[in-house]
C-alpha cells in the first residue's frame, strides 16, 4: 500500500467527538484515550486506541455502557468525556 492509500483509508477524527456523546447501538473505534492514571485504568479494562466498541446503553447521570468483544464495561461521564471516538 502506498502512503496515499493509507491516508485515504485511515479513520478521521471528528473534532469534539467523545464517548459521552456516543449513540446507543452505534459502533466506533477508540481514537484517543487520556494520559496518566485514566490511561492505566482503561488499559487494565482492556480498552486501548484502535479498539472496535459498541455503545450498549446510556444511563442517567451520564454513565455509558460499552461492549468490547463479549465484555461489558461501564464508563463514568467524566472519563467518557476524555475518550475520543471515531464512528465506523
Image (cartoon, grey):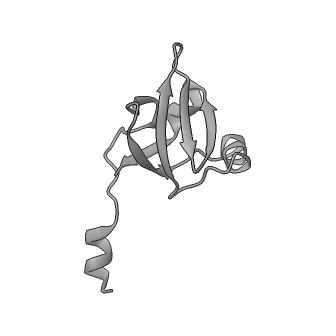
State the image coordinates of residue 23 (x, y, percent, origin top left). Answer: 37, 31
User: Residue 12: which quarter of the image?
Assistant: bottom left
Q: Residue at x 69, y 50 (%)?
A: 43
Q: Is residue 80 left or right of residue 2?
A: right
Q: Residue furthest bottom?
A: 1
State the image coordinates of residue 7 (x, y, percent, origin top left). Answer: 30, 72
User: Residue 72: which quarter of the image?
Assistant: top right
Work out which quarter of the rendered image holds the N terminus and state it. Answer: bottom left
Q: Which residue lies furthest to the front in this view?
A: 70
Q: In this view, does 34 lie to the left or right of 86?
A: right
Q: In this view, does 78 lie above or below 27?
A: above
Q: How many labels does the image show?
A: 0
State the image coordinates of residue 38 (x, y, percent, origin top left). Answer: 67, 40
Q: In this view, does 66 lie above or below 58?
A: below
Q: Which residue lies furthest to the top in this view?
A: 60
Q: In this view, does 54 lie above or below 51?
A: above
Q: Which residue is drawn at 57% across and 26% down?
A: 78
State the image coordinates of residue 17 (x, y, percent, origin top left). Answer: 37, 39
Amino acid at each position: 500500500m502506498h502512503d496515499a492509500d493509507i491516508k485515504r483509508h485511515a479513520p478521521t477524527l471528528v473534532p469534539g467527538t467523545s464517548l459521552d456523546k456516543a449513540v446507543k447501538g452505534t459502533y466506533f473505534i477508540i481514537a484517543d484515550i487520556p494520559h496518566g492514571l485514566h490511561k492505566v485504568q482503561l488499559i487494565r479494562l482492556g480498552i486501548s486506541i484502535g479498539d472496535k466498541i459498541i455503545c450498549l446503553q446510556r444511563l442517567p447521570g451520564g454513565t455509558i455502557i460499552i461492549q468490547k468483544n463479549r465484555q461489558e464495561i461501564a464508563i463514568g461521564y467524566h472519563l467518557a468525556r476524555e475518550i475520543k471516538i471515531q464512528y465506523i
